[in-house]
Image (cartoon, grey):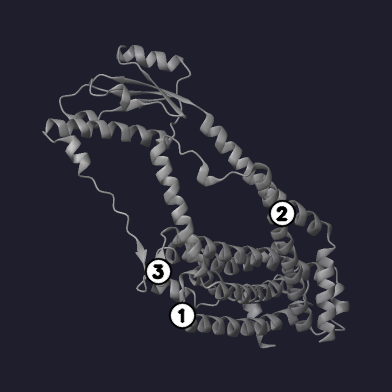
Amino acid sequence: MSKLKLIIRREFIAKVRNKTFLVMTILSPLLVVGMGALIGYLGKLNQENVRVIAYLDESSLFQDQDFEDTESVKYLDFSEDDYEVAKTKVDISDYYGLLYIPKKDSINDIASNVEFYSKKSPNIIVINSLENKVEERLRHVRMTQLGIDIDKLNESKVNANIKLLDFEGGKSSKLINSMKIGVGMSAGYMIMMFIIIYGAMVMRSVIEEKTSRIVEVIISSVKPFQLMMGKIIGTALAGLLQFTIWGILLLIISAVLSSIFGVDTLDMQVVNVPSDQAEVMKSMAKSDAQLVFEELKNLPIATMFFSFLIYFIGGYLLYSSIYAAIGAAVDNETDTQQFMLPVIIPLMLGVYIGFASVISDPHGPISTIFSMIPFTSPIVMLMRIPFGVPWWEIAISLLLLIGTFLLIVWFAAKIYRVGILMYGKKPSYKELYKWLKY
């Protein structure tokens, strides 16, 4: 045990004192914040870019109010011009494009022959907006032709807002499901990134010591299993320290930015919404925020926290032991590519199942099955837990994860024991199987 502690301490100090580790620990939060600020700035620039769109209405069915200017789009009426003249004007100008509405005998013919001319491929959002405007006006004209009273039709519209309650009368909010999805996805994605980053770090550490022949000296004093576990645990501790520092720095940066550039999102003006409707929307948003806050109290916080720790540690130990075995089996990082695909596929599958199945049906058979499979359970189960998972499912999943981890460590130790002293030969899967029998 004392030798294992020495190896863990050696690996931890070696990682923490590395210049790359120190630089990335400080720079990574700054890069994340800077990237977010850049994306926000570019998005703001994109919104400030005003597009000028000309329209030529030969049908005479459209009115000026059908093409009202917005903050990002300005409309110009070219209906007095000839078709070819309008095209020429737009072509030689800096206008975004020309919307042409022909004159036809029927509404259906008009709808199917509307054209948009532009010098470059138009933005799909802009095209969808124009299609909605055309459809709305033509629908209005069609209803008038059919003798439908549009005012009465508008008055007959009713908006239903279903309230969410449990059988004890407690209120809930539709926003809480989005928050549960966000929490689950963040936890699963964090585990996947930790496994990939620090598992690969374990593998590279094994390869470096093997190629430099330092391992031959080390292996004379400690058992291969102790060396492997020492590397895995030491690297994990360094990674947890780095994650903790990142979290603290991000909180500090967020607090500083909020105090300097803080904006109350509930007090922001809603674009193109009348003031009375905006006040109603703000009131509803505040009401929903209160419900979400109350609902957050009912989340299984303790279960989520402890489950995250257990799955975080279990998932890392499971995969990092495989990474250590791969590092021991090869002489350089290039040779690891043939073994990496079987390791990455379960992680990617877990993320895919989380996005495709857990979000739509967290208690469905697919979500439940993959939350039990040890190679995907650290990601899928963490995405399910915010929605409420029976304790016995979590217990079975953890037992399978721990059992598989012990089995994988046993296999990995056999490969590590033989491969750590093998040089100059690129092993195959068949040879790895033989090593397991030694």
SS at circle 2: helix
Q: Quadrant of the N terminus?
A: bottom right
> Residue 382: in sight, yes or no?
yes
Q: Is residue 3 left or right of residue 371?
A: right
Q: Viewed as shown, does residue 404 lie left or right of 56?
A: right
Amino acid on which disc 3 is placed: Gly
Residue at x 69% of width, y 75% of height: 325
Residue 37 drawn at (x, y percent):
64, 43
- Packing grade of label 1 (10 A; few <14, some 14-19, many >=20) is few
Residue that label 3 marks: 170
Nearer-N-terminus badge (2/1): 2
Give the number of callouts. 3
Q: Around disc 2, counting alpha carbons within 10 Å, would you say few (fewer than 14), some (14 to 19), or many (20 or more)?
A: few
| Viewer-closest of 269 and 382 | 269
Amino acid at dot 2: Ile
Which residue in the structure is indicated by mark 1? 390
Distance, label 2 to label 1, CA atoms, is 37 Å
Of 300 and 123, the residue lying toward us = 300
**Residue hosting label 2:** 252
Separation of marks 3 and 1 at Cα, in angstroms: 21 Å
Q: Position of residue 59 (x, y in %)?
A: 22, 21
Q: Say which residue appears at 67% left-offset and 50% top-offset.
A: 32
Which residue is pictured at 57% across the width and 80% down the height?
401
Quarter holding the C terminus is: bottom right
Q: Earlier in the sequence, mark 3 or mark 2?
A: 3
Q: Mark 3 to mark 2: distance in Å? A: 36 Å
Residue sitting at the far left? 147
Position of 186 with respect to 105 (left or right) is right
Q: Nearer the viewer, mark 3 or mark 2?
A: 3
Between 49 and 119, the residue placed more toward the observer is 49
Quadrant in the picture for residue 217 = bottom right
